[in-house]
Amino acid sequence: MCGIVGYIGKGQAAPFLLDGLNKLEYRGYDSAGIAVYDGNNIRVEKTVGRLAALQEKVAGNMPQGSLGIGHTRWATHGRPSDRNAHPHTDCSGDFVIVHNGIIENYLSLKETLIEKGHIFKSETDTEVVVHLLEEVYNGDFESSVREVLRQIEGSYALVFMSKKHPDRLICTKQDNPLVIGLGNGENFIASDIPAIIARTRKTYIVADGELAIVKGDSITVKDRAGNVIDKEIFEVTWNAEAAEKGGYEHFMLKEIHEQPKAVRDTISPRLSKDGSSIVMDELKWDASFLNNIHKVTIVACGTAYNAGLVGKYYIEKLVRIPVEIDIASEFRYRDPIVDDHTLMLVLSQSGETSDTLAALKEAKRLGAKTLAITNVVGSSIAREAAQVLYTWAGPEIAVASTKAYTTQLILLFMLSLYMAGIKGAQSKERIAELIAALEKVPGEISETLEDVEPIKTFAKQYGFNEDVFYIGRSLDYHVSIEGALKLKEISYIHAEAYAAGELKHGTLALIVKGVPVIALATQTDVYEKTLSNIKEVKARDAVVIGIAAKGDTELEKYVDHVIKVPATDTLLIPVLTVVPLQLLAYYAAITRGADVDKPRNLAKSVTVE
Ligand code: M6R
């Protein structure tokens, strides 16, 4: 979490820093700050609250200078406040830094530094880094920074600035993302590409342990040992508009509406020319590889985990390999049974989620074959996994994940078909039938998106209820879990998803008159049983909104309202049924006046454990 930026060049630093932080605010938004060197002094401006508060503070008196760094914070150590906001300075004011991550040994370092006379101004872990730099400084900026890195433990993306060395910024990373944008006579540093895309598409993706000396007209990247690395330029293919709201009120709404395209972009490059088979040139798998896989373990967090639940169903149903699924933060601590016959599938939109990355590393250590499904090219998880499949969803900015979920489902579905084809687990006819259904999905999502008005009405009607229940069986249950998460995180309504058959084992006690229940009933093999469960909640006077496939004329007899999505294969229908659930969450949040794109206490990318 937290977003960091840096600028050096011939232009003014502050406009880039503020604009870059604006693009990174999804990473954290409890305080913000910038530091700019004006040729004599470093001016630090920081304040608690959103970036807008900082912008207001400096409006009319913008820090002047061509060297600067900035930060938008998601608090870990020390509550959100002016003094805990970054950038942080040493005692002399010669050095200033911004940091994303956690310095785990900060307490012992802080004690030692205080004994040596350093005066701390904040409660953060970060501040030790800048005092340590002051302490070990030997006249050589780079070697002093390296000494700091030798002494700190934890995760970080760091940018160091010094008025003693105004011709450069130094940046480095360990387990947190960092990119450098290559400009013309100016260079940029940021946690993520949206911050720099308006200025350049040419980037270096910094790897763990690398350290870059960034000047206005040159960038030198070195490895841990200090050897210069011939860094490959990563050219960003999407444009600046992709990271803008494009006329929508919120990123979340824009991203919901981008799903037909995102899904199409994820499918198209992986279909054979005649559309009869799945092509995954990214994977070099054959039958012998797959025959050696005895089980698949899926690991992820949040929405990606919810996609993994559907993925488990796909792989078991289509490939007939057993699948385990773990929440990433639990995986490492349960002594998992993983070996070289395990395919470890990690799902992560950002490719930076700390728990998912740690689980991946642990699985690698245990000998598993690893495959990442991620949306961010060159992300830590993409680099760490042996193989990668990218969802081509484009940048997802809203904290509430939407198009990442649907593209992950699509990719998991395609991966399952691909594996089924190699293993001969499904007939050619069945695979062809499913591919034909798959190709229609983008159009079917568009069709689902046309029917928004009833959803807005339900959101207004039920948006002020304090509890909402989601029920379904089989794949409908898995989608319910995602629907409940969406509602919770952006509208703050307490929402729970239950396997419909499980209600009577306890939760039915909570169903009383007027409680909204969202009931998904699209899975034909359990349809009648789901109907029985719906009747159970109706008998307790719940208000039931049913979700069914078009052509279903039964469900409406038993529920208060029905939302219908296009009929498709029951395996693919989760990609459609989740759309009204995303919209319901969105409009419920609007009804309650919540800040949709920046829900309280959350941040987009969780890079702390
Ligand atoms: O970037 P990741 O997919 O690894 O992120 C995982 C979760 O943090 C994320 O899905 C989170 O649950 C979202 N806020 C859900 O909308």
Image: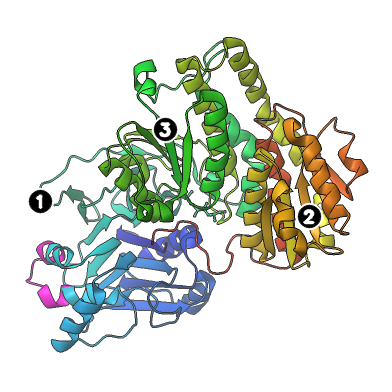
Residue at x-position 85% and y-position 61% = 461
Image quadrant where one finds the C terminus: bottom left
Query: Main SS of the magenta segment?
Result: helix
Location of mark 3 (residue): 295
Q: Position of residue 512 (x, y in %)?
A: 83, 64
Residue 25: tell me if it is visible.
yes
Q: Is residue 259 above or below residue 271?
A: below
Residue 9 left/right relative to 147: right
Q: Amino acid at mark 3?
A: Lys
Quadrant containing the N terminus in the rendered view = bottom left
Q: Which residue is mark 2?
A: 517
**Viewer-closest of 232 and 528:** 528
C-alpha span from label 3 to label 2? 36 Å
Q: Is residue 541 left or right of residue 290?
A: right
Secondary structure state at the residue bearing disc 3: strand
Label 3 or label 2, whichever lies nearer to me, is 3
Q: Which residues are magenta?
A: 133-145
Residue under the image location 53 percent in, 15 percent down? 277
Tell me, for residue 225, which label it has, or none. Answer: 1
Residue furthest right as drawn: 557
Quadrant assignment, res 142: bottom left
Residue 257 x/y as whole percent: 67, 43
Classify 10 Å Cα crowding around label 2: few (below 14), some (14-19), many (20 and above). many
> Mark 1 and mark 2: span between their CA atoms?
59 Å
Is residue 180 one of those drawn in magenta?
Answer: no
Q: Which secondary structure lies at badge 2?
A: strand
